[in-house]
Image: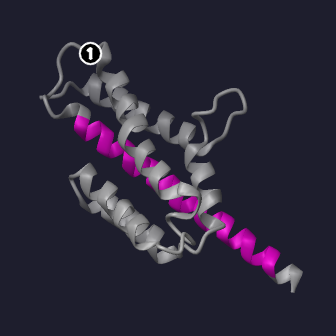
Amino acid sequence: MVSPKLELQRRRFVAQKGDEYAIPDPKDDRRGLANEFARELATTKVDKANIHGLETLAWSTESIADILDYIRVRVGRDSNERSWAKGGVGVRLAKVLERDIRKDAETFYKDKTEYPSDAVRQLHLELCREFISHLRSLYEFYKAQRGKDDEEES
């Protein structure tokens, strides 16, 4: 059983990381990654349904591999390189979710002595969900901004 203190620390960690994923900082290139991906995806032909599908999947699955497969399948189907494959955005997003966010989860448990055997994987999944939630919100913001820009140019 997880202690209430450890659970509180974990929840604070997830909230802190969520802020780091969403809010850029020029001094730290790892901050604001969800923001960067959202901005880049908003310039592609990826539609809102794909981003919402990604978020829905993230919240409904217990497998990080399902999330990565969702992205990789869409990259593979984008032979014209106009959406998920444009500029390698999908491949880079999958790498961040798979590697960088896993490192964040491992960092949290590095100095902890007792925790469930599945704790790192569970935290990794929760951090992926947090990242994707920010990605979706920011994507919609940038997509709406692009819509206004397109209207002004007309």
Q: Residue at x 21, y 32 (%)?
A: 119
Crowding near pointer 1: few (<14 within 10 Å), some, many (20+)?
few
Residue 135 belongs to the span the image colors magenta? yes
37 to the left or right of 131? right
Q: Residue at x 58, y 45 (%)?
A: 22
Q: Nearer the viewer, residue 98 or 2?
A: 98
Overall secondary structure of the magenta stretch? helix
Residue 14 belongs to the span the image colors magenta? no
* Quadrant into which the C terminus falls: bottom right
* Quadrant into which the N terminus falls: top left
Q: Nearer the viewer, residue 94 or 56?
A: 94
Amino acid marked by disc 1: Lys
Residue 76 locus on image (x, y percent):
39, 67
Q: Which residues are magenta?
A: 121-150
Q: What residue does disc 1 label?
A: 112
Residue 150 locus on image (x, y percent):
79, 79
Residue 144 locus on image (x, y percent):
69, 72
104 to the left or right of 17? left
Q: Residue at x 87, y 80 (%)?
A: 152
Which residue ends up furthest to the front in the rendered image? 79
Residue 139 locus on image (x, y percent):
59, 63
